[in-house]
Amino acid sequence: MPAPLFALWLVWRRRERGWWLAVQGPLIAGVVAFVVLSPWTIRNYRVHDAFVLVRTGVGTNLWLGNNPEATGTDWFLVEDGEGDVRRVSGRYAMPPELYDYLATLSEVEQERHLTRVALGWIRDHPREAAALWLLKFYYFWWFSDLNDIAPVPALREIAWGAVLVFFALGTIQAVGGV
């Protein structure tokens, strides 16, 4: 949805040039996107026997971020056999009954089921969901407080530091400070 909104914004900003000139850029970008995505979407339809624009994974990611054990990151906290808390990928912290049920479904059905489960959790726990969304927003712009818990993906944190620097420079430039 952001791409069509951005296209409309571009058309609106360039409307003084005439509507055809204002529409040309977004129209060409839309045609190019269609040409690039179509083969993969057709492939997905043949493989999954269902419409999948680019990839599956929306349901999985929605569930990873919206369930009783969600931490606001892509990590879950679990106790190991010695009582130490470790970070593990969310897939490994999935309840066994959910994991076993998903194994009986196709990939597209798994995504649809996880979407329903996550949306159900959000609907049934609006306060917890809102608190998680605020935490995710904070973690998006700053580092997670789970960095003290092993394993720490140092390269990811270093790369994110570079993103923060470029974000700050871009914001300063956009505001007109540079």
Image (spheres, grey):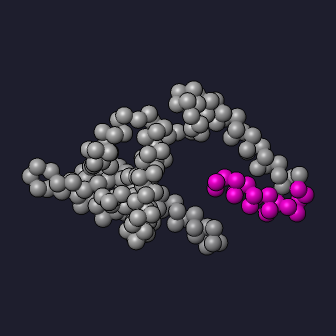
In percent of width and height, residue 40 lies at 60, 32
Image-based side of 1 in relation to 142, left or right? right
Provide residue 85's location: percent of width, then percent of height.
18, 57
Callout count: 0
Predominant SS of the magenta segment:
helix
Quadrant location of residue 125? bottom left
Q: Residue at x 44, y 45 (%)?
A: 113
Identify which residue is drawn at 32% across, 60% down: 68
As drawn, the residue found furthest toward the right would be 18
* Quarter occupied by residue 41: top right
| Relative height, residue 33 to residue 123 (above, below) | above
Q: Is residue 38 left or right of residue 89?
A: right
Q: Which residues are magenta?
A: 1-19
Residue ranking furthest to the left = 82
- x and y, in percent, of residue 14 in the image: 82, 60
Residue in the image at 58% along x and 70% along y: 172
**Is any atom of residue 159 visible in this view?**
no
Q: Position of residue 101 (x, y in %)?
A: 34, 40
Q: Is residue 59 left or right of residue 9?
A: left
Compare residues 56 and 109 and report the one nearer the observer. 109
Quadrant where the C terminus lies? bottom right
Q: Let me know if residue 85 appears in the view.
A: yes
Is residue 14 a member of the stretch shown in magenta? Answer: yes
Q: Is residue 85 above or below residue 107?
A: below
Instruction: Confirm whether the magenta stretch covers residue 65.
Output: no
Q: Measuring 74% from the left and 61% from the top, which residue is drawn there?
A: 9
Q: Nearer the viewer, residue 33 or 51?
A: 51
Report the front residue among 81 and 121. Answer: 121
Quarter holding the N terminus?
bottom right
